[in-house]
């Protein structure tokens, strides 16, 4: 990873850690990165998480919803940045709920939209911003 790209990642991590500390957002996502960049980025993630007394989760399979239907997340990793363990639990439950719907063939219509809305709310999106995706 070149220094410019690393600097962008670190700046974003710092900002999202501060947002979590101040409860401006329930949950944030770091910029996506490739597996080979994990060891380079991890020390900065740890440093800023510790400094802000928040937590992070290394996500290798980010949930895909209609909220970000145009984003290709295959092969990318992110850090989920949060303050409360309850937030991480909500995210992991959301992923499980989506899988159950997919496995049962019911990931469509209102159920599919509900998954996207729940993800948007975890990320701190307003209802108008979430609804904009379907207008």
Image: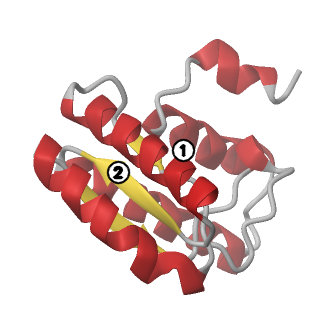
**Badge 2 or badge 1: first in the primary sequence:** 2
Nearer mark to the viewer, of 2 and 1: 2
Mark 2 to mark 1 CA distance (whole Å) = 14 Å
Percent x, y for residue 61? 57, 75
Q: Quadrant of residue 47?
A: bottom left
Name the residue at the top extreme.
128
Q: Nearer the viewer, residue 63 or 109?
A: 63
The residue that disc 2 covers is: 81
Q: Relative to 41, is 63 on the left or the right? A: right
- Tell me the quadrant of the picture where the C terminus can be found: top right
- What residue sits 70% from the left and 72% below the top? 102
Image vertical order of residue 83 relative to residue 105, above or below? above
The residue that disc 1 covers is: 119
Q: Relative to 65, is 7 on the left or the right? A: left
Q: Quadrant of residue 72?
A: bottom right
Answer yes or no: do the residues labelled 2 and 1 have beta carbons within 8 Å? Answer: no
- What residue sits 25% from the left and 27% below the top? 23
Percent x, y for residue 64? 69, 61
Q: Is residue 2 visible?
A: yes
Q: Relative to 124, is 112 on the left or the right? A: right
């Amino acid at each position: 990873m070149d220094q410019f790209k690393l600097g962008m990642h670190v700046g974003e991590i710092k900002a999202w850690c501060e947002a979590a500390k101040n409860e401006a957002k329930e949950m944030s996502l770091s910029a996506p990165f490739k597996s080979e960049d994990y060891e380079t980025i991890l020390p900065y993630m740890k440093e800023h998480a510790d400094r802000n007394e928040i937590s992070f989760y290394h996500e290798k399979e980010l949930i895909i919803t209609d909220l970000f239907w145009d984003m290709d997340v295959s092969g990318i990793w992110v850090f989920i940045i949060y303050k409360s363990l309850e937030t991480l639990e909500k995210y992991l439950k959301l992923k499980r709920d989506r899988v159950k719907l997919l496995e049962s063939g019911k990931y469509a219509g209102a159920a599919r939209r509900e998954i996207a809305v729940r993800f948007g709310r975890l990320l701190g999106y307003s209802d108008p911003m979430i609804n904009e995706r379907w207008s």
